[in-house]
Image (cartoon, helix red, strand yellow):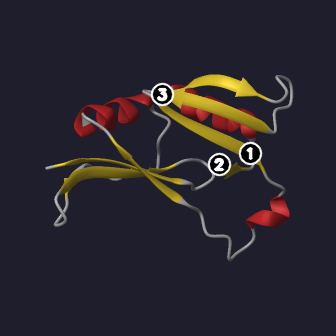
């Protein structure tokens, strides 16, 4: 489950990345939402502003994907992702890229070289 400040904003962000809203607690003022894409299901829950003060460490999740370059291109073309690294080959034998959502949750997409 990923912490978010604004569930509707999160739904809009992930929708632009090709995720589909599959559930939420309240359609008018959601505090909890579930989105899916390509068999991956992400859960998001609203958290109060006082919970965001330092040292609140944001998690990072890794996803194994088939087409790292194509997914990167799709996300770049969405115009939504401002905090995204380029695709790169790593010394540990993966091809990957990283991004952060509006609440600074980290997402990494990779495949073996």
Task: Give the residue at x 26% y 31%.
Answer: 70
Q: CA distance from mark 2 to mark 1?
A: 7 Å
Task: Give the residue at x 25% y 35%.
Answer: 66
Depth check, front residue: 42 or 101 = 42
Label 1 element class: strand
Which residue carries the number 2 mark? Answer: 1
Which residue carries the number 3 mark? Answer: 37
Q: Which residue in the rendered view is the most extreme toward the front?
A: 39
Depth check, front residue: 67 or 82 = 67
Reading the chain from its start, which is encountered first: label 2 or label 3? Answer: 2
Q: How many marks?
A: 3
94 lies above or below 24: below
Label 2 element class: loop
Which residue carries the number 1 mark? Answer: 45
Q: CA distance from mark 2 to mark 3?
A: 15 Å
Task: Give the residue at x 48% y 25%.
Answer: 18
């Amino acid at each position: 489950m990923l912490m978010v400040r604004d569930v509707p904003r999160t739904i809009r962000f992930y929708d632009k990345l090709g995720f589909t809203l599959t559930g939420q607690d309240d359609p008018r003022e959601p505090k909890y939402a579930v989105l899916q894409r390509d068999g991956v299901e992400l859960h998001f829950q609203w958290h109060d502003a006082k919970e965001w003060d330092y040292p609140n460490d944001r998690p990072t999740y890794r996803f194994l994907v088939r087409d790292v370059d194509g997914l990167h291109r799709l996300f770049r073309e969405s115009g939504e992702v401002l905090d995204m690294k380029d695709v790169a080959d790593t010394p540990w034998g993966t091809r990957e890229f990283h991004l952060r959502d509006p609440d600074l949750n980290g997402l990494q997409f990779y495949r073996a070289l």
